[in-house]
Image: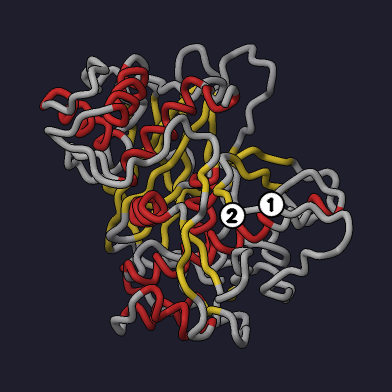
Amino acid sequence: MATNPERTSSGLLQINVINIQNNFPIQNARVTISYKGEPDRPVEQLTTNSSGQTEQVQLPAPPVEYSLEPSIIQPYSEYNLMVEAEGFEPLAISGTEILAQATAIQPAAMTPVGGETPPEDPVVIPDHTLYGNYPPKIAEPEIKPVNESGEIVLSRVVVPQTVVVHDGVPTDSTAKDYYVPYRDYIKNVASSEIYSTWPRATITANVLAIMSFTLNRVYTEWYRNQGYDFTITSSTAFDHKWIYGRNIFESISLTVDEIFDNYLSRPGVRQPILTQYCDGRQVQCPNWMTQWGSCSLGEQGYSPIEILRYFYGDSIYVNTAEQISGIPASWPGSDLTIGSSGDKVRQMQEQLDEIATVYSAIPRVTPDGIYGTRTADAVREFQSIFGLPQTGVVDFATWYKISHIYVGITRIAELV
């Protein structure tokens, strides 16, 4: 592969630092940023706020055009991070990817000094799948037979709270298994498989394909029926690429938050379709989506479903999961805003106020079931911290993000 071209453009980076044991934010963590090839020459030094977040910093990156068409030139720049905080083991991250005109979000989960589990250090982020060399997907039927005796199959399509990712090929018993929240898993895979600079419709189409593939693995209990204790692998030959500790991108994160309960269906088929794909440059794959082809169609103005039907045929359609696991209360079906009232408002206020005890920048609210200006202010601050449009209105994405953060800091879902 070619080396980095001139970094004549720039992208943004924010680092979010948490305690790996309880998901609480770490204030006053120090983050030192350097070019990957020059680890001893810092380019930025940042400190986290009460939400465990650094400010967004602008960093040099190759021109955006390199990420919009296949090229041998690496379209992103790579940085090393050293994260330090009092009472925690230092954490080194190598290979954070910065794309031009995009916002990268780098998670940093720190281990307390003397913790039972040694930290993953350093976190090494390998090449992006569109730039590096990865094994092509081994073709499978897009609809799995589910009538063999003894096979476990879910009775309905459920969005799992957690995906168990086997970080290697299925037969590699030395590979680690990671328990990853479903949305975080999808954001990681999409950030590893496509570029966030691509058209919004292209990102949406690819996220739908990634989610449908993943939910097929969940619904059919594919690996568990083969005697394994995981949901999916990180191998591109068998599934799609997931990378421990990698950065994600804001445009991908927002898309996932808005549509994470969707998957792809065909008429008369209960299971989510195993929507396979390839890059379309290093690998060709008839009747599957090609990632570069989807980028081209998005640039031509195709909608997400038009992109998907171009590759998978006219019978494919977007469906919605019947259940979302591991949440204290389901989406009320319409936005909550100033003037709203009732049990759903109270449930949301209770969760938001619990979050505010950990994220002190969020104003405390009284769970009275009445959506007033103070609740709207708290929602707006929550949206600011967690990368959502700051409307002060609890829409679908905000409702489930509040649930996600609430569950993460209270571990309440372990009791549900």
Q: Is residue 367 above or below residue 6?
A: above
Residue situated in front as seen by the camera: 174 or 341: 341
The picture places residue 263, in percent across and down from the top left corner, at 51, 62
Q: Residue at x 57, y 26 (%)?
A: 416
Dot 2: element = loop
Viewer can see residue 70: no
Residue 332 position by quadrant? top left
Residue situated in front as seen by the camera: 43 or 19: 19
The picture places residue 315, in percent across and down from the top left corner, at 51, 82
The picture places residue 1, in percent across and down from the top left corner, at 56, 71
The picture places residue 242, in percent across and down from the top left corner, at 60, 53
Q: Is residue 197 above or below residue 23?
A: below
The residue carrying pointer 1 sits among few (fewer than 14), some (14 to 19) or many (20 or more) residues within 10 Å by Cα, namely few
The residue carrying pointer 2 sits among few (fewer than 14), some (14 to 19) or many (20 or more) residues within 10 Å by Cα, namely many
Viewer can see residue 187: yes
Residue 160 position by quadrant? top right
Q: Is residue 349 left or right of residue 204?
A: left
Q: Is residue 323 left or right of residue 302?
A: right
Q: Which label sits on residue 157?
A: 2
Task: Report the amino acid beneath label 2.
Answer: Val
What residue is disc 1 on?
154
Dot 1: element = loop
Label 2 and label 1: CA atoms lie apart by 7 Å
Q: Residue at x 36, y 69 (%)?
A: 198
The answer to whether the residues at label 2 and label 1 have Cβ atoms under 8 Å apart is yes
